[in-house]
Amino acid sequence: MAIVHDEIDNWLAADLHGQLSTDERSALHAHLVDCAECRKTHQETKAMNKILEETLAQQKPDPTFEQRMLTGFRNRVPERTGLLKLLADLMRMRAAQVTAVAAVLLGLVQLGRMITGETGTPPAVRDRYANKQLFEQPSQVAATSEPGRAGALGKADELAAGKPKDLALAPPQSAVETRSKVEQDFKALPATVAPAKTAQTEGAAAETGTETEATSYTAEATSAETPSSELANRKLIRNATVELEIVSFDDAVQKITAFANEERGYVATTNSQKQANGKLRGQVIVKVLPENLDRFLQKIRGLGELKNQTLGTEDVTKTYFDTDARLKNARVMEERLIEMLKTKTGKVSDLLQVEKELGRVREDIEKMQGELKYWDSQVQFATVTISLAEKDMEEPAAFLIKERSQLALYAPDVEKIYNDIKALASQKVQITNAQLNRDYSGRISATMSMLIAPEESEAVIGRVKSFGRVENFQTQTERIAQGGNGMSENARTKRDKVELNITISREEQEQAFQQTSLRIRTSSVDKKAKDLRGVAEKQGGRVRSSTFSRDPDGRELANVWLRVPMKNYPALMQSLDSLGKVENVTVQRQDRTGTQIDEANAPADISIQVYSQGNIVSHQSGPLATLRHTVAQSAGAIMWSLRMIGVAIAFLAPWVIAVFAIVWIARRVIRPRRKS
Amino acid sequence: MDASEREQYRAAIHGDRDAFEMIIRTHSRTLFAIAYGILQNREEAEDVVQDSLVKAWKMRWRVRDPEKFPAWLSMIARHRAHDVFRKRRPVPFTDEAIDPNQANTPDTLAMDQQLHSALATLPELHRAALTLRYFEEMDYSTIENTLGLTNGALRGILGRALASLRKQLRPALASTD
């Protein structure tokens, strides 16, 4: 009930409009009986409904309304007629739509083809072309590959051999060329075909296929006779090169000569040369009859190990006969020219012209005759070039042992040692290069090279070593094979002169064997640095350089570099302890393997840093400095943020202005609408 | 919606002119009711219906589902009517109501005038629903379909519309009773 009361308006409206179900209606009526307020509302609503019905009924469209609407519509949207309507109707059909889309696609494809320039040959046609070529090729190969059929007369054979295949396989689309060839053949052979044709046609109406077959057989029969007669006329130049490894060159040459005689040939040229290790290498050129060439080669192979063989044939038939024909022509020409001279009619200048021409023709004739003769000789005999090499060609003849030594000397007086070494020079000791250098800072160094006879080498090198402290002595021995490579059992071995390179330097320039760096903390730097000098000298060391500095904070710093012999190094290190607190000791040692070093006398470098603590509080720290830092940093930060704000404003300003403008315009538009 | 009706809508969408003319016959009154509900003016409402039909014909391909065709039609009419209503400068209803052709008696004239001003205060949707109901006496579900409302929403709308009118016209009602 409560629901009906709350929504009494809805219920009453639905009731008046007859849209309540029977249950709902009875519920409503029951409530109306109970509720006086709703009853009143019911009355009012009923009256309201009536008024609405009455008033709005007046406004209802008149009966002709629909017709009016229809007429208006027809006037405003005129019906399409004729072709346009037909088209529009057509386009409404699904099938027509599909066709149209397909047509458009096809058009696009064609357009693309036109643009890219691809030829629109359908694949089927291409296949046919390929087939045709495949059919034609074997027939041509069959014709040319037969040795007897080639050259000038080979063309007819080719046609004859190729024709049956062409007829059998070539489809009607075969190229015009082949067809015309076949036609020519038919015309050329009417006489031979005639009997067969008449025999065939007498029996019955023969098929054209069998007829052509018969034709081709006869054609083949006629052409089959040609090869045998042709072979004799072929001009073939045969050449062979053979490379052999043999035991003895002379034996081989003798055997080759014997073989050549057997095969009715001759040895044309022989040449040989002797290698450093006594082995022979050479070339033999043999001329044999072409038909015996293969047998000859077989025999030669037995002589030794075959390294390489090539066999070549050059067919000069065509050029030979061409030249021959031209020669005949030239002869005829010559005769006619001679005839002209004999009759002696015409002007002198003409005669001169004839004479000149005759000279040219004769020159040609001679040239051609020469060519023919050359070819004849080439064809008559086959050329075999035999390269012979004796075994172990590469074995060395001798070995040479080369010794090369290198040593570095360190001495206090370079010049003295330089002269001492120079004094060693003698017959057996040759100084090839001696150089004494003094650079801008007064440092002296020397380089020397000498060649020492092998028997003296040990003694001389020993002498040189004794002149100073030896550093980095290297010896290199090389065994050089002469006249070949590899190993040899019987080759002699010889010692060559020993080459010795010496570099002499002052001791200071020597690289330290061991480097030590350490720090000493003390209160009085200056004094301790001086003490350090005394200590070093006592141990046989020298101060190489020293520095002294004092920084603004009152810190003093002295750097001292010392050099002592290795044997005194431990004692020096001990005595350093007395100077102050030794810190941060690092030792670096360079062990050079493969060199001979006099370790006790090798120099050791020590770099010492003597320093004092200085003022406890530095200028760079403390509350004042901190304050200064802070102020500077904050000022920097403020400046940075100001700059960033400026950037942000510059970036955002146009957007903000745009947004304000849009809002303002929108308000102007909305305000009048609200008023309306 | 039965099958033949749907077929008719489908044909109309696909450009069948006869089918569309049939739809004009059956639906133009509904469209008029909607337009009149919004505009409260017969001439303007007729123009709106005319415009809407032409527009519907031209735009018919936009409708995918034939079943939604009537709702789509009425939506076009509603938008068109709304446009006309918005473009119209505020015209006092009194001018039109005083039209002597429509006035029968002074009493009904006053009632008409009052009713018109009361209707003008209602939302557009409510007015459209009222006219659909009182012009065409359609049942609720058809009206809901036409206006694109959810099921059962119309009862509340009409109830509120009637109640609102009733409250505004109470003095006049009292006099007629």
Image (cartoon, coloured by chain):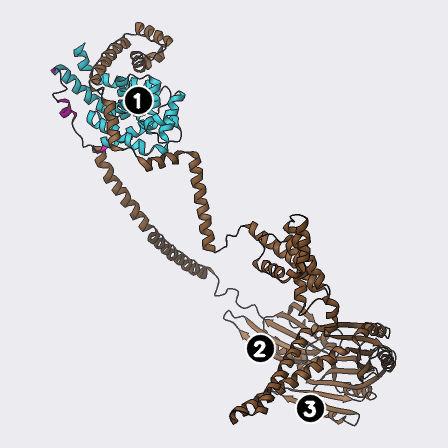
- B96 to A610, vertically: above or below: above
Q: Do the residues labelled 1 and 2 touch (CB within 8 Å)?
A: no
Residue A606 visible in the current orientation: yes
Q: Where is residue A232 in the image (x, y as percent from the top left)?
A: 75, 72
In the image, A673 versus A636, the foreground residue is A673
In the figure, residue B59 lies in which quadrant?
top left
Residue A514 locus on image (x, y percent): 70, 74
Discs 3/2, front: 3
Helix, strand or loop at mark 1:
helix
Report which residue position mark 3 lands on. Answer: A415
Q: What residue type is labelled 3?
A: Glu
Q: Which of B29 and A599 is in front in this view?
A: B29
* Badge 2 density bin: few <14, some 14–19, many ≥20, Cα 10 Å: few
- For mark 3, does the 10 Å Cα neighbourhood hold few (<14), some (14 to 19), or many (20 or more) residues? some
Which amino acid, by three-letter code, is at mark 2?
Thr
Circle 3 or circle 1, nearest the eye: 1
**Label number found at residue B26:** 1
Task: Determine the chain carrying the residue at label 2.
Answer: A
Between A668 and A636, which is closer to the camera in this rendering?
A668
User: Is A387 part of what is drawn in magenta?
Assistant: no
> Image quarter for residue A189?
bottom right
Say whether disc 3 or disc 2 marks the residue closer to the N-terminus.
3
Q: In this view, does B85 lie to the left or right of A209?
A: left
Helix, strand or loop at mark 2: strand
Query: What residue did someone put label 2 on?
Result: A547
Which chain gets the cyan colouring?
B
* Mark 3 belongs to chain: A
Residue at the (16%, 17%) spot, across then down: B111
Read off the magenta span: B85-105
Q: What shade has chain A been given?
A: brown
Taking A62 as reference, is A656 left or right? right
Confirm whether circles 3 and 2 share one chain.
Answer: yes
